[in-house]
Image (spheres, grey):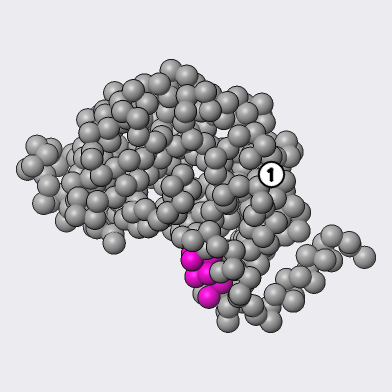
Amino acid sequence: MVINLINAVAQSLNFLGLGEGFIKLALPGEEFYDLDDIYDVFSSQQKKRLTLLLPGYGCAWGKCTMCGFGKKLAEVHRQYHGLLRIEANDFVAFCRMAIMLSVKQQPQWLYVYNGGSFLNVKEIPLAAQIAIARLIGQQENIDSLFIESRPEFVNSLSLARLADELKGKTLEIGIGLEAFTDRVREVLIRKGFSRGDYERAVGVCKNRGVKALTYVFLKPLGLTEAEAIDEAVRTIEYAFEAGTDEASLSCAFIQSCTPMHEVYLAGKFTPPRLWSVVEVLKQTKDFGPVRVGSFDDEPPPIAGPKNCDVCSRSVEMAIGRYNLSRNLNELTNVSCQCRNDWQKEINNQKSPS
Ligand SMILES: [Zn+2]
């Protein structure tokens, strides 16, 4: 279920004691929270998830070749330049309102996405970080908080501040390693950190009892389909060796105004085939729990992972069922004529004639 922000704000404004600037701070007409079910690897059961999209200042890094968040947030801030400044209280109010509006559904997980690093005080003020954690600590139904961060903001202090407020609830941090190979991560994706940086961050999480989820990117610019599969498999294997608790496969989709978009428009890049997604899941099944990230995002992708017109929908739905059950049988039962073409293409790329 998705709630339109404007309606939600209109209902809640008086209650929260917030003014018009607060409404304008949100993306007009767009959703700021969502409710769905996820598979919780820590309890091996499905749980209800509340996802909150915080309209923050966006990712301070903003250089990755596939990412469109920065452009979107810049656009929003240009639109409302001078009208408002996002204060720590505003972030907390968003969180409080999403919790309030989802109280009937009793979510157990809260996922907070801010299109960047939650732990970076320049993106989410420290006071807001602490107040959001405190708010979650006080919610009876919510037992786990998920945030995202680049490794450089993960340290003992930044984690301890949140953990203290969470009162023993689970904290999980999503870290975008994306690729094992340095050239792929640093040159093709422009991630701007080393495997050593990643390992240090995961180590700090381990020491602090914080769970780590590692994002792995399937099909960066500059890799063939076959190379992209191999890179994702190697990256997932490495992430579990480094101590991650979960991996999430981020499959390339095209967002406007990104380097990936330009190459796509020039006809030199396509997002991965869904068979490649299935292949990575099959090859990594023994490494640890791997989920598949959403093919939808904000701003909405122009193109995403797909197969042929006949099977795309059913394979995508099978991936969705896999995400909820983590049962690989969901994926081995799907078939289509186009799988043979995909297999041929992969074989050709592996042994070019
Ligand atoms: Zn097909």
Q: Secondary structure at mark 1?
A: helix
Q: In which quadrant will I find the N terminus?
A: bottom left
Task: Please report the bounds of the magenta region as a residue range.
Answer: 314-321
Mark 1: few/some/many CA within 10 Å (<14, 14-19, 20+)? many
Could you say where residue 202 lies in the image, as x and y percent from the top left?
A: 57, 30
Pick the residue in front: 307 or 19.
Answer: 307
Whether residue 53 sits left or right of residue 259 in the image: it is left
Residue 239: give x, y in percent of width and height: 64, 39
Residue topped by disc 1: 237
| Residue at screen point 64% across, 78% down | 335
Q: Amino acid at mark 1?
A: Glu
Residue 108 falls left or right of residue 15: right
**Residue at the location (25% across, 44% down)?**
141
Q: Position of residue 27 (x, y in %)?
A: 29, 49
Answer whether residue 316 is magenta in the image.
Answer: yes
Q: Nearer the viewer, residue 237 or 191?
A: 237
